[in-house]
Every structure is written in structure tokens, then in C-alpha cells.
Image: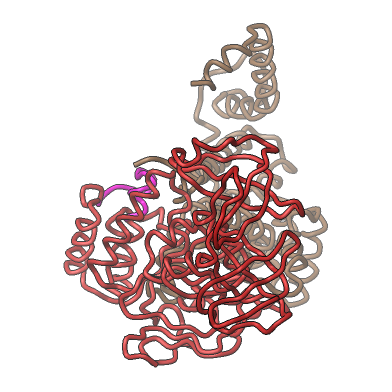
Chain colours: A brown, B red
Amino acid sequence: MSQISGQELNRNRVVDWALMVYIVLAYAFVFAPIAASFVFSFNSDRFPSIPLGDFSLEWYRAVAADPLVWQGLTNTLVIGVVVGVVSTALGFGAAYTDYRYKFMGKQVYLALALLPPTIPVIILGLAMLAYLSRIDLSGRAISVIISHVVVCAPFAMAIIRLRLSQMDPALEPAAWNLGASEWATMRHVIIPFTKPAIFGALFITMAVSFDEFAVAWFVSGLNETLPVKVLGFLQGQVSPRINAIGTFVFVTSMTLVILAQILLSGRTAAPRSSTVDKE
Amino acid sequence: MQRDTLVSFEGVVKRFGTFVAVQKMDFEIRKGEFLAIMGSSGCGKTTTLRMLAGLEAPSEGTIRLSGKPINHLPTWERDTPMVWQSLALFPFLNVRENVEFALKMRGVGKAERRRRAEQWLDRMQILEFAERNIAQLSGGQRQRVALARSLVVEPEILLLDEPLSALDAALKVRMQAVLKNLQRETGITFVYVTHSQSEAFSMADRVVIMSRGRIEQIGSPQEIYGAPRTRFVADFLGSSNIFTGPVTATSGQGLEISTKDGPVRLAGPVAAMPGQGAEATITVLDTKTHLSVARPEGDVNVLPVRVIGEEFIGATATIYAETDSGHEIKVQKSHDELASLPISAGQPLFAWWSPSDSHHVGAA
């Protein structure tokens, strides 16, 4: 109640409107290129120009008819799913280790585990190429998977770690105390508790892998993923097909990210049992 | 070992690095009793409970349950369920699933699990909430779920780690009655850790008072209240006036010590009589200490004091006064008894009590 009256008291219509306009402009700036790409993907004209030509699905048809695009898409999807699963599993292990154990050099362990996303992707891509070719793993789908796991696992770890930090520290020992072995506790308490974060991490890491270009470009060889393929198209000729692919990639990524968002924001504040209230 | 002993601690020590949380602990928990372990934070009471639950391993010594050493039994193989301070209910399970958890882990079949869980939910008067989420329950209802969850395996012993600390005062008193009745009806041994004197003294058959990893006293609430065994206990309970000084006279009928404010006498038998000249501590309960305007006659201890202030606690009031040397004396009386006294700051009065109400504690 006091919250509402407080809000009412502090309201200033002019400031409200100014902030609203500011937000609209900021979003417009951010999303204009994507929106343009989306609009032109349905435009019959060869070159993006205004006024628009007719509504047309011909660029989607052209993309769908291109076996190279299908191959890129298949690569991207397979790699994305494998990367998502592996990164989430690794991230979960790393996050649980951090939650459960105290050990010498834990700060170093954490710093190293969370480091990869801070390395410039060009450097990471080059290093990956040099390393993977030395152990004879470059130019294959597995090369992209390995490289993407390196990039994605820290995201998964960060997401799952956040969830574990919201867990009542007594929950795990309480399960042991009720007769659950450590494995049973993992299965019946830790995993159910972190489940939203596990799926959130799965979708986010898939989305990251799906969009990632630089590292994939270095290590993919002939097994190009869709973003790498797009660059190939651009180098050859500018075609509205790019817009069609771009729209598809954007929608897919957004779907994954929004799914993750729903999972992670839905009742993340785990109810603590120790609230004071009356019967 | 007595026949009715359920748990025994034999020379148990617990160290965390260089910090000694529990030092050389020897005591027994009797079958079917309500035992409270009380002390201020950091005294080792929770560590003691966690060792019994198998959540901490003793550094030295042996803990026996029904005569068998359990030191190296992991907590999931012991039948020592615990009610946690935070309750630690599983937020992703509903009420019934929470209660069924321990049975599920023991491989009890689905139908049997459900039957036994519902029986306990009914007993705790929360059966109607069986399918609810934990987040939808009030504090008191959660307490009941936590109790049902621990008791559903029908253990010999139940451990409780300050389970009432998050409740408001009225609900706390109500839950104390629930716990006490539950313990009486089931005959399950309760070990209840708390820092609250009122919780410990109102529910427990016996109370263990701990300080700095050591047991200071074990006894019934009446014993401890009436005869604190150490200076620490007397201080901790806060209901005694305490006097320390060298012994000036001893006899079969009592002893006398000399304090800065004059002699203080004790009449009655004294266990472990201190020698002449040794430091001794004499206490007297604040309820057995009296105040008067005129110097009382007869065989009493008398100290001239000045009133510092007064504190109301429901039907009684505590008068705080100090002697010339600054030693604090408190007197607890009903408002009627105090009505005839001029109580105002600085007022000179006489504090007095019968030497037979004096009590000797170890000098520690």
C-alpha cells in the first residue's frame, strides 16, 4: 500500500513522458537494422530501396532451394545442440564444485573457469585453429564443437552458479540427514532445484553457439556453420537471401533466449522457509 | 552405562583447524527424555548436535547410539533426523512429497509412503494442505511440515536446531506446547538446541548448559535455576546476585566470605567446601532478595544499596540497585510487594536475604 502511494507522490508527468520517449528511441536505434533486414527479406526488389516493391517469399524460396544453406543449417543445429548439452553438463559440474567444496586455489579455479568469454574471439579462434590442427582435429564439426564449448561452458556455469547461490545451504545436508546418499541427493534435490537454470543454460549456450561466427570461421573448414556461410554469400554477391537467413537466425536465437529468460525469471527467488509470519 | 541411555558422548572433541569447538565432552542422553542444549552463539551446541546427526565427524572420542559407536556412520545411514533452523523444506516438492522424502529414500513403496505421510500430516493437523506448495504455507504450518518430515520414519531420536527462532512470540509459545505434547505422546527422545532460556526451561526434562565448547552444568530446569553450579551459569541465567571473595569462616553449617561491601554468609550444607582464605562465590536468586527502608533485624545478610532503576516485566518488576563499591544487585518482586517501597533513582535502601537462601558455586 505504501508502495503505491509513494509512487503516486513522486510522479511527474513530464519526466514520465520524457523517459518513455527515451526508451522508445533507444529501442528503435537498437532494433532498426534487424527490423530493416526483416522487412527487406519479404521485398521483391533485388536491392534494398524505398519505396518497397511487392511482398514476396522468393528469397526464402531461394534460400530453401540452396543445398549449401541446408548443409550449413544442419551443421549449425547439430553443433548447437551438442554444444548446449556438453557446455551445460560441464557448467553444472563446475558450478556445483564451487558451491559444495572449499579447496586451495579456489579463487584461481573460478577465475580460470570464467575467463574464456573475456578473450577476444579472433585470438581465441586463431589459438583454437593452431591448437586443433596440431592435434589433427581442425576443419571438422568436432572442431567447432570443442571451440564453442570453451566459449559457452562459462555462461552455463555462471547461470547455474547463480541458482545454487539461492539455495538454502541446509537443503543438501537436510536430504542426507533424511537418508539420501550423496548421489540420491544430487538426483532428488540438487538437480530438481537447479532445473530451471539447467534448461536456461541449455538454451542460452545453444543460442550463443548458433550465432557465433569468428571462432567457427577459423576452425570449421568445410563444415561451415550458417553464420560462416552468410559471410561466404556476402563476399560473392549482396543478395536479399542474406536478409531471409538473418531473419531466420534472429527468430531462432530470440526464441531460445526468451525461453531461457522465462525459465530463469520464473520464481527464481526460491522461497526461504524461515519467514516470520502468523499462523 | 545406564540401561536407559540412548546416546553417550565419550571424551568427544571437535576441532576446526586450530579452533576447538567442543572440548572433551562426556554426557549421556536418556531414552525418551526431552533434552535441551543451551548456550550463547559459538558455545558448541550446534556442533554437538551436528556430530550426533553425522554432519560433522568428532576429532576425538566416541559417540554411541544404543551402545554402538556411530562415529564413522554417514548421516544418511543413521536414524537421527533433524529439524533445521531454516526448516530446509524442499521448495520444489509439495507438502506431502516433502514428508514422503525420507521414506522414498528408504525404498518404501508408493502406497505405503502416502499412507504414512498422510498419517503424520493428520497428526500435525495439516492434512488439508497436503497438496500445497511450501511457499503457500504460513510459518507455523511449515514448522509442522518440518516435524512431520522428520518424524515420519519414526526414529528413536529427533534433533532440533533452534526450530522456533523465526516465529513471533505467541506462535512460539504455541509451538512449544505442540513440541512438548508430541514428545510426551511419542516417547521419542528430543534433543533441542537453543539459545533461549525460556524455550529450554519450559520444555526440557533436562538442560545442558554449554560455554566455550564445554558443558557447564546438566540438570533439570529447577536444579539449574535454583542451584547454578558455576559462576558462568549464574551469570548466564541472569537471575542471581553474585558475590565473590575470600572465605573468612567455615563450619558444618555454612561459610562466610568477605566482600568489599561486607560479609556474606551461607547457611546450610556445602558440597566441596572451600578452604579458609580461598576465593569462593555465593549467589542468591533475585526473587529471594528483599529490599527495605529500615535496616532489617535478625540472622540475615544485609547490604546498603542505592536504587539505579526499575524494569517492568509483566506482573513483576526488577529493581536494579548498587552497593557503595558499585556491585549490582537486582531484586525481582510483584508490583504489590513493591508498592510500599520508595523506588526512585538514588534512593538508599537495604538489600537483604536469609543466609539459608545463599548458594555456593565453584569459583570458576
- Placement of A130 over or under A203, stated as above or below: below
Figure quadrant of the C terminus of chain B: bottom right
- Placement of A9 over or under B136, stated as above or below: above
Q: Is residue A270 visible?
A: yes
**Viewer-nearest residue: A95 or B163:** B163
Q: Is residue B95 left or right of residue B241?
A: left
- Placement of B281 over or under A21, stated as above or below: below
Q: Is residue A84 visible?
A: no
Q: Work out which residue is located at the far front of the displayed protein and give it.
A: B297
Residue A70 lies, in percent from the top left, at 53, 50
Q: Main secondary structure of the magenta part?
A: helix
Residue B107 lies, in percent from the top left, at 27, 76
Tell me what residue is drawn at x 74 percent, y 71 percent.
A132
Q: Tell me where the magenta segment starts and ends, as one range.
A: B130-144
Residue B359 lies, in percent from the top left, at 55, 69
Q: Is residue A170 left or right of residue B136?
A: right
Tell me what residue is drawn at x 52 percent, y 49 percent.
B332
**Viewer-nearest residue: A201 or B216:** B216
Figure quadrant of the N terminus of chain B: bottom left
Q: Is residue B119 left or right of residue B89?
A: left
